[in-house]
């Protein structure tokens, strides 16, 4: 999996991706990532990429041409690296609070791609014309506004990357995460068996894997019903429709 992040702050992206699990995954080649500075494609000596909006209003807007040229440069690089596969058509994700809400289902869908391009806006966003021309997806991580698209892009990359082979130490880790089966994850415990007079549930110490699995499913259902009734109702409906 190759992640390409188009941004005004490339160091913000790479400093984060080079740490912890994702950093180790990059070192062993399980994923690749690059941050491309949109300012490098500005056509003025000050490398400015923003201007006032037509019609007035507060704030500046990122201009179409630098963004377009940056996207085309990344596409050219992708196609040059894989000429035998024909012309690549990677998904280009504009990170915006106006987009589709990002969830585990979309993460699983995107994890099947070979290349993903994330376009990070700033100021009042990006000229609509270039978005219409290059963006294949507009995605949001929630109903709130941030100062730029870098943090949402990092959230999505982290979620998608951990679904890619070789990123996690155990493939089972991703399979048992919250949302993988429509439910929140069950509570987890480690040593010691008693801490602050709180004991680990006896079933987890029994060695009976079948009963442990049953207990974990039960706890997932209880936790989801209590904390996320919206998810619980959805899970229950899908379960009933499947006749389970």
Image (tube, rainbow, N blue to C red):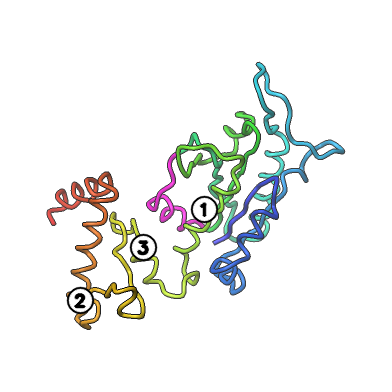
SS under mark 3: loop
Q: What residue did someone put label 1 on?
A: 155
Category of crowding for the residue at label 1, using alpha-carbon neighbours closer than 10 angstroms: few (below 14), some (14–19), many (at least 20):
few
Is 118 situated above or below 96?
Answer: below
Q: What residue did someone put label 2 on?
A: 203
Q: Which residue is most to the bottom? A: 207
Is 9 situated above or below 197?
Answer: above
65 or 75, nearer to the observer: 65
Residue at 53 percent of width and 37 percent of height: 145
Q: CA distance from mark 3 to mark 2?
A: 20 Å
Q: Earlier in the sequence, mark 3 or mark 2?
A: 3
Using the rendered view, name the quadrant where residue 50 is placed. Answer: top right
167 or 124, nearer to the observer: 124
Residue at 30 percent of width and 80 percent of height: 193
Q: Earlier in the sequence, mark 1 or mark 2?
A: 1
Tell me whether the residue at label 3 lies in contact with that at label 1, contact meaning CB atoms closer than 8 angstroms: no
Is 2 situated above or below 196?
Answer: above
Q: Position of residue 240 (x, y in %)?
A: 14, 50
SS under mark 2: helix
Residue at 52 percent of width and 53 percent of height: 155
Q: Which residues are magenta?
A: 100-113
SS under mark 1: helix
Q: Earlier in the sequence, mark 3 or mark 1?
A: 1
As drawn, is 31 to the left or to the right of 223? right
Q: CA distance from mark 3 to mark 1?
A: 16 Å
Looking at the rendered image, the disc whose residue lies closer to the viewer, 3 or 2, is 2
As drawn, is 14 to the left or to the right of 113? right
Category of crowding for the residue at label 2, using alpha-carbon neighbours closer than 10 angstroms: few (below 14), some (14–19), many (at least 20):
some
Whether 108 is among the magenta residues is: yes
Q: Position of residue 130 (x, y in %)?
A: 63, 33
Category of crowding for the residue at label 3, using alpha-carbon neighbours closer than 10 angstroms: few (below 14), some (14–19), many (at least 20):
some
Q: Quadrant of the C terminus?
A: bottom left
């Amino acid at each position: 999996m190759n992640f390409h992040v188009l941004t005004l702050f490339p160091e913000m992206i790479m400093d984060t991706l080079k740490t912890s699990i994702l950093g180790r995954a990059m070192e062993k080649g399980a994923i690749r990532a690059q941050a491309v500075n949109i300012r490098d494609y500005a056509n003025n000596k000050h490398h400015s990429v923003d201007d006032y909006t037509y019609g007035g209003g507060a704030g500046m807007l990122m201009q179409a041409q630098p963004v377009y040229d940056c996207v085309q440069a990344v596409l050219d690089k992708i196609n040059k690296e894989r000429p035998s596969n024909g012309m690549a058509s990677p998904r280009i994700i504009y990170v915006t609070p106006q987009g589709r809400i990002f969830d585990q289902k979309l993460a699983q869908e995107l994890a099947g791609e070979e290349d993903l391009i994330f376009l990070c806006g700033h100021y009042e966003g990006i000229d609509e014309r270039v978005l219409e021309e290059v963006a294949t997806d507009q995605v949001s991580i929630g109903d709130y506004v941030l100062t730029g698209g870098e943090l949402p892009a990092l959230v999505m990359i982290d979620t998608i990357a951990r679904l890619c082979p070789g990123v996690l130490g155990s493939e089972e880790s991703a399979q048992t995460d919250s949302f993988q089966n429509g439910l929140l994850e069950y509570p987890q415990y480690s040593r010691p068996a008693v801490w602050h007079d709180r004991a680990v549930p006896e079933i987890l110490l029994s060695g009976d894997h079948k009963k442990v699995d049953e207990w974990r499913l039960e706890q997932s259902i209880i936790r989801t019903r209590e904390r996320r009734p919206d998810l619980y109702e959805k899970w229950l409906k899908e379960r009933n429709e499947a006749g389970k």
